[in-house]
Image (tube, rainbow, N blue to C red):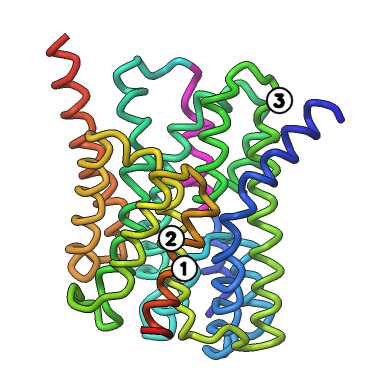
Amino acid sequence: MHWSLIVYCGVITFLTRFSMIFLLKKDIFNNKTKKILSYVPAAIFPAIIFPPIFLDNSGSLDLENNPKIWAAVIAIFVGYFSKNIIATIFAGLISYWFLIFVI
Amino acid sequence: MNNKLKTLAKGIVDVSPLMIPVFPFGIIYGVIGMELGIGPYMTLGLSIIIFGGASQIVLLQLFSGGASSLVIFSSVGAVNSRHLLYGAVLSEHLSTLKLTWKIILSYVMVDQAFAVSNTYFKNNRKNENKHFHLLGAGFTCWTIWQISTILGIVLGSVVPEELGLSFTISLTFLALLINDFRKFKNIIVMSVSGIVATIGFNSIPFKAYIIVAALSALAVAALLTLMNSKEK
């Protein structure tokens, strides 16, 4: 691998982060667009969350006896009622470990 | 403590719980870099120059599979294109800052920092030093990522694979969405994103499934928003 490739990849990554902050002026969006943009976390994070939970190492759908699904459900349940980020993460992690190591 | 330092500290505190999986993830990244034989300087160089965990792993996977530079470059761009949306969301709060600030904050605008600072910005619109929150959150991520990369390079695999690392990453992002589970529309948007990503994971080229899923979900969000405004 050449350092030049790493630098190009660094530049494109920086530009994805910088371009919108640099180009967009304040109040360029109307309220409707702002409302739609408020869905950005809800639109992106599940795309990061779902594949590692529902797909196995070979990339095929794994719905049977999948401890990750149950642990995620418990995490959502705890998160819904506690509204606490740390509690949610640990509830999911501990129930996952319980399911794979104890049961 | 003055307001700038206070806001900076708040950013550090807010992002800290999200660093739990970043640390082992960084170690594993460092190990993969060394195992592929690109050496300690390039492994760390990637973490400093690109500073984007998922895209660095994708880069290494493609490199080890013998992909061309153009494919590697396109894939890194596709994986990181979600930041365009983060930038669009945060521009409202950052557009009046000086160019140097925009450059520094862009460099550290990773998923976790975006998530916590976006929430902070929305709740603290009047704080004129609110960008210090992103500075604190972003450089916390940066520091943890560099330290864990170095540990992976030096120590090798100290994190047992059985502990389920990829799942912990899912959990932190899930924890960031807990408030969205209260609104029916958000649940629809989240489902669209997750289902499109799961289906597209293998079929969409250049690892672009995240941005494809995100844009599909945003299209549904736009539809829901427009439908709602017509009813009124």
Task: Please name whichever residue, B3 or B184, is drawn nearer the observer in this view of the structure.
Answer: B184
Q: Are marks 3 and 2 on the same chain?
A: yes
User: Which residue is located at x 40 percent, y 70 percent?
Assistant: B72
Is A10 above or below relative to B116?
Answer: below
Residue under numbered circle 3: B129
Mark 3 or mark 2: name the one nearer the start of the chain: 3
User: Does residue B225 sit above or below B85 in this rendering?
Assistant: above
Tag 2's secondary structure? Answer: helix
- Assess whether mark 2 and mark 1 are in contact (beta carbons under 8 angstroms): yes
Alpha carbons under labels 3 and 2: distance apart: 31 Å
Q: Is residue B224 left or right of residue B72?
A: left
Amino acid identity at mark 1 = Leu
| Relative image position of residue A103 (x, y in whole percent) | 35, 84
Question: On the rendered structure, is A49 left or right of B155?
Answer: left
Rendered image quadrant of residue B28: bottom right
The residue segment tinted magenta is A13-26
- Residue B193 is situated, as x and y percent measured from the top left of the image, at 25, 50
SS under mark 1 = helix
In the picture, residue B232 is in which quadrant? top left
In the figure, is residue B90 to the left or right of A43? Answer: right
In three-dimensional space, the C-alpha distance between marks 1 and 2, rounded to whole angstroms, equals 8 Å
In the rendered image, the vertical position of residue B232 relative to residue A92, given as above or below: above
Residue A72 quadrant:
bottom left
Q: Is residue A14 magenta?
A: yes
The kind of residue tagged 2 is Leu
Secondary structure at numbered mark 3: loop
Q: Amino acid at mark 3?
A: Asn
* Label 1 sits on residue: A93
Task: Please report, as a chain letter, where disc 3 is located.
Answer: B
Please state which of residues A51 and B20 is positioned toward the viewer in this rendering. B20
- Asked whether B76 falls inside the magenta stretch, the response is no
Instruction: Identify the residue shown where x is 57% and y is 46%.
Output: B113
